[in-house]
């Protein structure tokens, strides 16, 4: 599929050093539309939506904020900690708003599996269905999220 001028701007904003040091695509050679399409197929197969996942990630982040950014145990099996650093990040899709630089780590204590994500990740998943490209620093694999967090 041919990229629109807007798609080209979005792709440019996703490159390393533009919004974030490492960018949003990692070593993925697919454009963001294909990344989204492929991840949506996985979600459909799993019976979950991007909104379901974003809501779950936001739930953990809020529980951590409620603990005043200290480590907290959620639902008896998740160890959750959020680190807030100075600054904000804009959406690479040119969506209005900026997102607090905060990094939440959720560890499923039964499996030992951990996920780290940002406030921007929640927005990208909820609004754009974008989990980032393969091997990007904050890539969240939909299949792993569903297996560990639901």
Image (tube, rainbow, N blue to C red):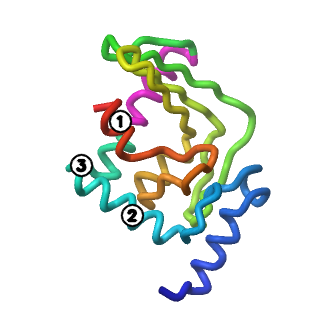
Residue 38: image tag:
2
Residue 142 vs residue 18, the one in the foreground? 142
**Residue positioned 72% across, 56% down in the render:** 19
The residue carrying pointer 3 sits among few (fewer than 14), some (14 to 19) or many (20 or more) residues within 10 Å by Cα, namely few
Q: Which residue is mark 3?
A: 46
Residue 66 vs residue 131, the one in the foreground? 131
User: Where is 27 relative to 61, above or below?
Assistant: below
Estimate the spatial distance between the alpha carbons at disc 1 and disc 3, rounded to whole Å: 15 Å
**Residue 86 left/right relative to 137:** right
Residue 142: image tag:
none
**Residue 41 left/right relative to 35:** left
Q: What secondary structure is marked by label 3? A: helix
**Residue positioned 69% across, 45% down in the render:** 88
Q: Nearer the viewer, mark 1 or mark 2?
A: 2
Q: Quadrant of residue 145?
A: top left
Estimate the spatial distance between the alpha carbons at disc 2 and disc 3, rounded to whole Å: 13 Å
Q: Nearer the viewer, mark 1 or mark 3?
A: 3
Residue 68, magenta (yes or no): yes
CB contact under 8 Å: marks 1 and 2: no
Q: Earlier in the sequence, mark 1 or mark 2?
A: 2
Considering the whole magenta stretch, tell me its main secondary structure.
helix
Extent of the magenta region: 57-69
Q: Quadrant of residue 93?
A: bottom right
Q: Position of residue 135 (x, y in %)?
A: 59, 49
Q: Position of residue 76 (x, y in %)?
A: 32, 11
The residue carrying pointer 2 sits among few (fewer than 14), some (14 to 19) or many (20 or more) residues within 10 Å by Cα, namely few
**Residue 105 left/right relative to 89:** left
Residue 56: image tag:
1
Q: Earlier in the sequence, mark 1 or mark 3?
A: 3
Residue 140 vs residue 69, the one in the foreground? 140
Q: Position of residue 140 (x, y in %)?
A: 48, 44
């Amino acid at each position: 599929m041919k990229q629109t001028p807007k798609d080209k701007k979005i792709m440019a904003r996703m490159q390393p050093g533009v919004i974030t040091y490492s960018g949003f695509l990692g070593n993925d050679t697919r454009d963001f539309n294909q990344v989204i399409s492929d991840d949506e197929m996985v979600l459909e197969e799993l019976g979950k939506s991007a909104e379901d996942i974003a809501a779950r990630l936001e739930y953990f982040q809020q529980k951590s904020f409620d603990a005043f950014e200290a480590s907290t145990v959620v639902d008896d099996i998740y160890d959750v900690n959020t680190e807030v650093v100075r600054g904000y990040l804009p959406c690479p899709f040119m969506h209005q708003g900026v997102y607090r630089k905060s990094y939440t780590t959720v560890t499923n204590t039964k499996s030992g599996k951990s996920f780290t994500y940002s406030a921007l990740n929640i927005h990208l998943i909820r609004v754009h269905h974008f989990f980032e490209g393969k091997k990007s620093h904050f890539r969240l694999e939909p299949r792993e999220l569903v297996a560990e967090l639901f």
